[in-house]
Amino acid sequence: MNTSHLSLSELPLAFQEQMQAQLGADFPEFGAALTQPAPVSIRVNPQKPALETSGLEQVPWCSDGFYLPERPSFTLDPLFQSGAYYVQEASSMLLAEALKQTVNLNRPLRVLDLCAAPGGKSTLLVSALSDDSLLICNEVIRSRVSVLRENLEKWGRPNVVVSNHDPEELDKLAGFFDVVLVDAPCSGEGLFRKDPDAMQEWSEANVALCSARQKRILAAAAPLLDEGGILLYSTCTYNDAENTDNVRFLAQNGFRNRSLNLPADWNIVEKKTDGAVGYQCYPHRVRGEGFFISVFQKTAFTASVKLDARTFRSIRALRPRETAAAAKWLKKPSDFSFWEKPNGDVMALPKILEKTFLFLDVALRNKGFGLEIGQFKGQDFIPSHALALSTAINPNLPAVTLSKEDALRYFKKENIAFDEPVKGWLLAQYNGLNLGWMKGVGNRVNNYLPKDWRIRMDIKEYV
C-alpha cells in the first residue's frame, strides 16, 4: 500500500514562502495534498499488450497511462520485468499530449532525449514514434547509463541509440534532429511528496544552480535542431527561476513558443511570461506530482550535418554464412543488416536506418545502438538478453511457458526444473511475453538471465 509521511512542517521555510507567493489562496490546498499518499500510475507498452487494464482509470492526457488502486511490488511482477509497462508518474505523461499536438508523428523523425535516464520519457517517446524513426537517448552521468539501457532493452524497440555525452559534445549533430526533449535536471520540488529525501537537497542556492545548468543545457540543445524543429522543455519543479525564466530564455534565443489546447477539466495551469506559455501540474489540481512543460519551434537556421557512412567506423558487416546464422533469430530478417562490434557483439540494424546508424557510429564516441542479438562462440551463436526482450525476435523459436512462481525463480536466477529433458536454447515465457533465455544441457536447464538483472527480494509471499 502506498503511504506518505510528509508533513508541512518538514517543508523548507523558503520553499513554503515561494509556494505561498506563487499559489496565493490555493496554498493550503496544495499543502494538504502533499500530506496525502502519492497516486500510483503506469504506462503500458503498446507492442507488448499483456497487462489487463480493464477497470483501471486512464490518465487523461496519455492513452497508454493508467492509475493503479494501490502500489504493488513491481519488482516481483514478471510483466514489469519483461517490459509490458513502465512505472511512471502521471503528470510527466503530459509529454504524450504535447507531442501529439505539436509533432507530425506519422513521418520518419530524428528525436533526441537529451537528459534521458532512467528512461521513462524515452520509452514514451519511442512508443509514439514510427518504426522508421530514430531515437537517441543521451545521459551525461555514466553511472546512470546502465539503468537507461536496461529500461530500453525491456521496451524492446530496435530503432534506439543510447549515448553517454555532455550536451556540448554532441556538436557533430548540429541541425540533425526534428525533435529534442530536454527533461532538465532540476531542484525536484515536484517530487517532495513522492521522495521526501529530495527536500534534504533543496536550497535557494541549489535552485539558482539548477536554473543556470538548465540554461547551459538548452543553449547546447538549440543548435542540434533543424530549422522548424520542436524543442520540449520540462522539469519536475515549480520554481519560476527554473521554469518560466528558461521559457523566456528560449523565446528570446531563436525559438517560437507553441501553445497547447488542454481541456479545462484537466486542471493544468497555464503559466505565461512575455508572450510564451508553459503548463504546470500541481498535486492539489491533478492526480499526479509537480511537473512543468513548455514547447518551442526553432526559427533560427543551423547548417545541417552531412551524412557520410563511408568514414572509418568501428563495426564490420557479417559475412554471408554468419548473416544466415544470425538472421534466423529475427521475425523479419530481411528488414535488417547484420554487423559485429570489436568486442564480438552482433547487432541487427534496421535497413531503413542503416545509413544513419553508420554515421552515428562515427559521430558519437560513447554509444550503443541497434539491436544486440548475441555473439558467435566458435560454431555456436549465443543469443543476447536484449534479443529475448525485443519486439523483432522470431516468434517461432522454442519456448516454454512458466508459472508465476517459476517466472519469479527465473528472475532470481535460479535454474528451473522440468519433468521432461530439454535441449538447446529456450525462451522462458510468462503470459505470452519473453522473459529471457534458458538452455537445456543434459539433465539440467541453465538460466541465462544477466547477473545484474537478478532480483534479490524474497518471493515466498508473492507466489
Image: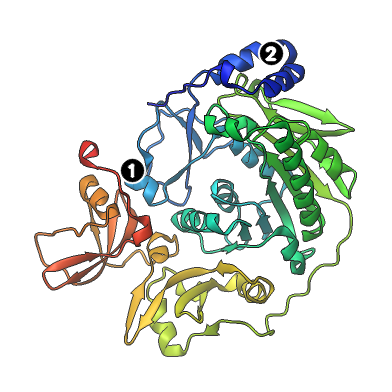
- Residue wearing tag 2: 26
Frontmost residue, 312 versus 393: 312
Residue at the spot of label 1: 77
Residue drawn where x is 55% and y is 68% of the image: 368
Placement of 25 over or under 96, stated as above or below:
above
Residue 448 visible? yes
Query: Which quadrant is home to the N terminus?
Result: top left
Q: Position of residue 422 (x, y in %)?
A: 16, 68
Which of pointers 2 and 1 indicates the residue nearer the eye? Answer: 2
Query: How crowded is the residue under tag 1: few (<14 C-alpha within 10 Å), some, or many (20+)?
Result: some
**CB atoms of marks 2 and 1 within 8 Å:** no
Q: Amino acid at mark 1?
A: Asp
Q: Residues within 10 Å of mark 2 (few under 14, many from 20)?
A: few
Residue 222: image location, x then y, percent: 80, 54
Picture coordinates of residue 70, whole percent (x, y): 40, 27
Give the vertical position of 259 relative to 283 (above or below).
below
Q: Nearer the viewer, residue 4 or 388?
A: 4
- Does any portion of residue 107 appear in the rendered image? no
Q: Is residue 313 left or right of residue 82?
A: right
Q: Quadrant of the rendered structure where residue 463 is?
A: top left
Q: Residue 325: percent from the left, percent from the top?
A: 38, 82
Disc 2 to disc 1, C-alpha distance: 39 Å
Q: Secondary structure at mark 1?
A: loop
Q: Amino acid at mark 2?
A: Asp
Please name the residue shown 57% across and 51% down the image: 117
Does residue 186 lie above or below 174 as drawn?
above
Q: How is the image coloured?
A: rainbow
The tag earlier along the polypeptide, 2 or 1, is 2
Give the SS element for disc 2.
Answer: helix
Name which quarter of the figure residue 95 lies in: top right
Residue that appears at 59% across and 38% down = 93
Vertical placement of 172 versus 83: above or below?
Answer: below
